[in-house]
Amino acid sequence: MKKTIVSVVLAIASSVAIAWEPSKPIITLIGNSPGSGNEISFRMVQTELEKKSNVSFVIVNKPGVSELVAANYFATQPADGHTTLVAACNDIYVAPEVWYPTATKFNAMDFVPVATIGKAPLAFWANIDSKVNTPQELIDAMRKNDRKINFALGSPGHRLALEYLIENQKIPHSHVQPIMYKGGGAALLDVMGGHVEFAITPVATGWPNMPSGRLKLIGVASDKKLAGLEKYPLMKDTVTGLTIGTCWSLLLPPGTPQNVQAWYRDNFVPILHTKEIQTQFEKNLIQPAPNEHTPEGVKESMTNLRRIWMPVAQRFSPE
């Protein structure tokens, strides 16, 4: 009896002792250059969380090799809650071990998800001076052999959409030149500057540039019309099955203790449900992902993402 009482007391004391809070600024790694969807979505949540707590976040951009520079570094960091990674799902979860077998030093499924911050469908963009205005006109231009069609891509995850279009429409690969950038923001800068005619990035990274009049939206790879984009074509109406997006998930290093996970669950996740964040997401065409606000929800979604897009990823090299 005494042993039972002692065990209960110790269990209660232990549960009180394991409460955790950050003791210093939290480093948040972004595997792309500034202006990426990872950074845009996280900064919105960061601002609201810092208002409601004494915690501060320091964003560190580590672009390179489709986010692998950041992810490889992240995988080696202490699981003490003071280092996080905002990962673009397609790059980190779909097929890094296929695209970069020697450079990938992690298993994405070993990372500890906090939640998916938000999602956005991929979009096909053109320089404002391009004569291409619709998905069909884009396909027609790609079929011709009078010039090579260049696409600025923020990551191999964005190239999945291009490869699907090429295969579906039986377009010769020799007619198309993918150009890889260290993030969607950098890719769009070259399109707006007239150095590359087309780009594929999340709609959320390109939409803020539309008012400048230097960027044209050709089509959205969504399964339905988005609020505010009703007049723009859906790619699937021309290319059957072309519905692909990206998402941005906050991750903790492998082996992160439950008490650290609990702090993020109790502090980070509620911010995603606030009116302030929902308003900002709507304004920036970022879709909430309430089914992925738990580790289990994120892992289930990423498993499904791999099942759908791994076969496409295995058919090309991003280099």
Image (tube, rainbow, N blue to C red):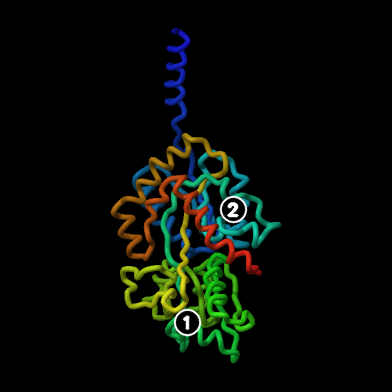
Q: Secondary structure at mark 2?
A: helix
In the image, what residue occupies the spot 34% across and 45% down? 52
Left or right relative to 145: residue 220: left
Q: Are marks 2 and 1 in contact (CB under 8 Å)?
A: no
- The three-letter amino acid code for the residue at tag 1 is Asn
Q: Secondary structure at mark 1?
A: strand
Q: Nearer the viewer, residue 29 or 143?
A: 143
Residue lying at the far right of the rendered structure: 102
* Residue marked by disc 2: 71
Q: Is residue 265 above or below residue 17?
A: below
* Residue marked by disc 1: 127
Q: Quadrant of residue 219?
A: bottom left
x and y percent of residue 210 in the render? 39, 76
Residue lying at the far left of the rendered structure: 275
Q: Quadrant of the N terminus?
A: top left
In the image, what residue occupies the spot 46% across and 89% down? 131
Q: Nearer the viewer, residue 266 or 295?
A: 295
- The three-letter amino acid code for the residue at tag 2 is Ala
User: Nearer the N terminus, badge 2 or badge 1?
Assistant: 2
Q: Nearer the viewer, residue 51 or 170?
A: 170
In the image, what residue occupies the spot 47% across and 29% down? 18
In the image, what residue occupies the spot 57% across and 72% down? 163
Q: Quadrant of the C terminus?
A: bottom right
x and y percent of residue 70 in the render? 59, 55
Left or right relative to 299: residue 211: left
x and y percent of residue 208 in the render? 39, 70
The residues tagged by marks 2 and 1 sit, at their Cα atoms, a distance apart of: 32 Å
Left or right relative to 113: residue 47: left
Q: How many marks?
A: 2
x and y percent of residue 179 in the render? 60, 74
Q: Quadrant of residue 307?
A: bottom right
Residue lying at the far bottom of the rendered structure: 146
